Image (cartoon, grey):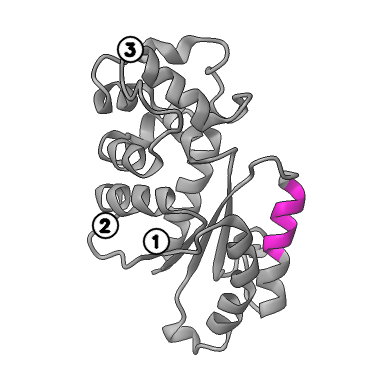
Amino acid sequence: MHIHVEEPSMEAFLRDFLPRVLPNTALWRPINHGSKPQLLKELPKRLRGYASTPPAFRPLALVLIDRDEDDCNALKAQLAAAAQEAGLIHKSQADGVEFDVVNRIVVEELEAWYFGDAIATAAAWPGVKPTFANSARYRNPDAIKGGTHEAFLRVLHGAGHWKDQTRLPKVESARRMAAHMDPARNSSRSFQHFLSGLNALVELT
């Protein structure tokens, strides 16, 4: 399974998180495109390459991309079109047949998944109280206003962590959270959609 991501922090998260939740027999490789524009630019060529590979040797693909400020439906349509134009079947159109590609939108970005597991956050940064998630502004991890990585850094600042940082150290944060996150308790709907897509691909391998 090839997992296409747009940035180093998601790659770091997956490298530490997936071995904890996937069976040992699962084969996977993250492909970091370096940015969202690059992922969108390079993905069609990658998918055409998969389509030209005999089915018995063709890797399945999971595409993870941040919504950011984009229209979610338009982004989904763009990803779906890339798969269809390559001659591959994506999960949303499978209708009972086997599929090649799962597209998942991360709403709005990776740090929203951290807000979905306050207990993991408290374990990764001692002094953070998991009750921060009870605040109205953080209760829905996928609807936090003003940028989730900025909001997450404010939570850490409040517990005395990284007070000298004006930007969240994203890769280190990803590794810390990956070590503690519990899929069963994560309240981010976006995270749960990612997990369901991942598990659907694993079942095909």
Disc 1 to disc 2: CB gap under 8 Å: yes
**Residue located beneath label 1 in the image:** 202
Q: Position of residue 10 (x, y in %)?
A: 43, 50
Mark 1: few/some/many CA within 10 Å (<14, 14-19, 20+) = some
Callout 2: SS: loop
State which region is magenta: 73-80
Q: What residue appears at the point 67 percent right and 62 percent down from the top-left corner?
A: 79
Mark 3: few/some/many CA within 10 Å (<14, 14-19, 20+) = some
Answer with left or right where residue 158 lies relative to residue 106.
Answer: left
Q: Is residue 200 magenta?
A: no
Q: Nearer the viewer, mark 2 or mark 3?
A: 3
Disc nearer the start of the sequence (1/2): 2
Q: Tell me if I can see residue 89 in this picture.
A: no
Residue at mark 2 to residue at mark 3: CA–CA distance:
32 Å
Question: Where on the picture, by quarter, is residue 3?
Answer: bottom left
Residue 23 is tagged as 2
Q: Quadrant of the C terminus?
A: bottom left
Residue 129 is tagged as 3
Callout 3: SS: loop
Answer with left or right where residue 133 lies relative to residue 107.
Answer: left
